[in-house]
């Protein structure tokens, strides 16, 4: 049990560090090879914040633990809204950026409803994965369409050129990817071991420990952006991450290891994802018309309280 716990903790720490290093240096390599800033920016926007979830879910599916993968996706979306956004709100009220209510909010609601429809029969099939990938392409086109200064916005996503030789950036990127895969393997191994030792389902471990761990980059990014005064980034990070978790991470267990799903996924966990997504959408619609067009700090307390209730619910129903 101690060994499993150490593997899980070490895996989480290395996962967060290696993910950042891999993404940053892979982008630098692409820049130095004169790849279009548009292409690099789109890639960073699409996969940047969801990289830990993607690798962990893929490894879990390959290790015949698809419920850890599915739990990771749903648990991360719940944690992103209730824990990450809730904690971010404690630092500052969050202004609602223009366009959020007409583009990102409808998209996150649509992809959440689509995911629910695919999970409803309690079987995540190969074709469910294909449908989600097609939906992801559609979502990406809609998100990128109509941007007045799209190239400028995407270029802002690029890391600053550090002036280092391309081989150095390439080596760091390769090492980062290797550590990312290795730490994900370590994390999944530890999670499966803990689930077995405690007699709880792999789904519960995926929904809690693994999901919170892979949501740490979003937490760090959101709090950092708010403290630096970039308030508009915080809510965009949450919505973007949740969209891409469902559209790019959930398809992985479907494509790699199609399987039956735990009945609790639809009766409990998906309903929390949907409920919190709707609650966030309602908050945006209500507070965008207020004097400051901001979601107030007290909403953060409600979100964190809701996450505590969810964890208690999982704890009482763990099996």
Image (tube, grey):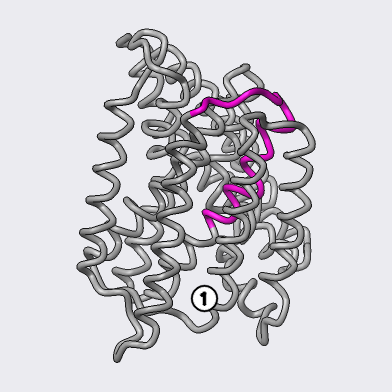
- Going by the image, does 119 lie left or right of 186? right
| Residue 47 locus on image (x, y percent) | 62, 52
Q: Is residue 178 above or below residue 41?
A: above
Q: Is residue 94 left or right of residue 151?
A: left
Position of 6 with respect to 121 (left or right) is left
Look at the image and say whether residue 28 sits in the magenta stretch.
no
On screen, residue 254 above or below 38: above
Q: Residue 161's quadrant in the figure? A: bottom right
Disc 1 crowd, CA 10 A, few/some/many (<14, 14-19, 20+): some
Q: Residue furthest bottom?
A: 291
**Based on the displayed image, in which of its 4 quarters is residue 38 positioned?**
bottom right
The residue closer to the viewer here, 111 or 221, is 111
* Relative vertical location of residue 175 with respect to residue 111 in this rendering, above or below: above
Main SS, magenta region, reads helix
Chain part drawn in magenta: 241-263
Q: Position of residue 204 (x, y in %)?
A: 41, 26
Q: Is residue 41 above or below residue 24?
A: below
Quarter of the figure with the C terminus: top left
* Picture residue at 45% right of the left edge, 61% below the top: 278
- The structure residue drawn at horizontal position 41% and vertical position 74%, both measured from the top left corner, is 284
Q: Secondary structure at mark 1?
A: helix
Q: Quadrant of residue 88?
A: bottom left
State the image coordinates of residue 76 (x, y, percent, origin top left). Answer: 45, 44
Q: Residue beneath label 1, please? A: 100
């Amino acid at each position: 049990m101690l060994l499993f716990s150490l593997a899980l903790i070490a895996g989480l720490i290395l996962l967060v560090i290696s993910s950042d290093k891999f993404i940053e240096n892979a982008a630098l390599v692409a820049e130095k090879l004169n790849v279009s800033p548009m292409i690099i920016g789109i890639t960073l926007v699409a996969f940047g914040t969801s990289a830990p979830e993607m690798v962990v879910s893929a490894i879990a599916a390959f290790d015949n633990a698809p419920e850890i993968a599915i739990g990771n996706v749903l648990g991360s979306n719940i944690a992103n809204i209730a824990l990450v956004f809730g904690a971010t709100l404690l630092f500052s009220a969050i202004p609602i950026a223009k366009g959020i209510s007409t583009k990102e909010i409808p998209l996150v609601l649509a992809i959440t409803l689509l995911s629910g429809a695919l999970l409803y029969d309690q079987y995540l099939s190969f074709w469910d994965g294909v449908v989600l990938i097609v939906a992801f392409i559609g979502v990406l086109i809609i998100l990128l369409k109509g941007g007045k200064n799209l190239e400028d916005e995407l270029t802002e996503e690029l890391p600053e050129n550090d002036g280092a030789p391309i081989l150095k950036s390439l080596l760091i990127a390769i090492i980062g990817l290797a550590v990312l895969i290795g730490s994900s393997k370590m994390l999944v191994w530890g999670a499966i071991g803990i689930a077995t030792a405690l007699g709880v389902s792999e789904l519960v471990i995926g929904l809690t420990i693994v999901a919170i761990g892979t949501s740490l980059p979003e937490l760090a990014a959101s709090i950092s952006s708010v403290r630096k005064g970039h308030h508009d980034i915080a809510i965009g990070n949450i919505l973007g991450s949740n969209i891409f978790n469902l559209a790019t991470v959930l398809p992985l267990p479907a494509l790699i290891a199609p399987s039956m799903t735990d009945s609790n996924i639809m009766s409990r966990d998906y309903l929390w994802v949907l409920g919190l997504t709707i609650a966030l959408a309602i908050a945006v619609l209500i507070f965008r018309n207020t004097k400051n067009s901001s979601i107030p700090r007290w909403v953060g307390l409600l979100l964190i309280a809701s996450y505590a209730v969810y964890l208690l619910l999982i704890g009482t129903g763990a099996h």
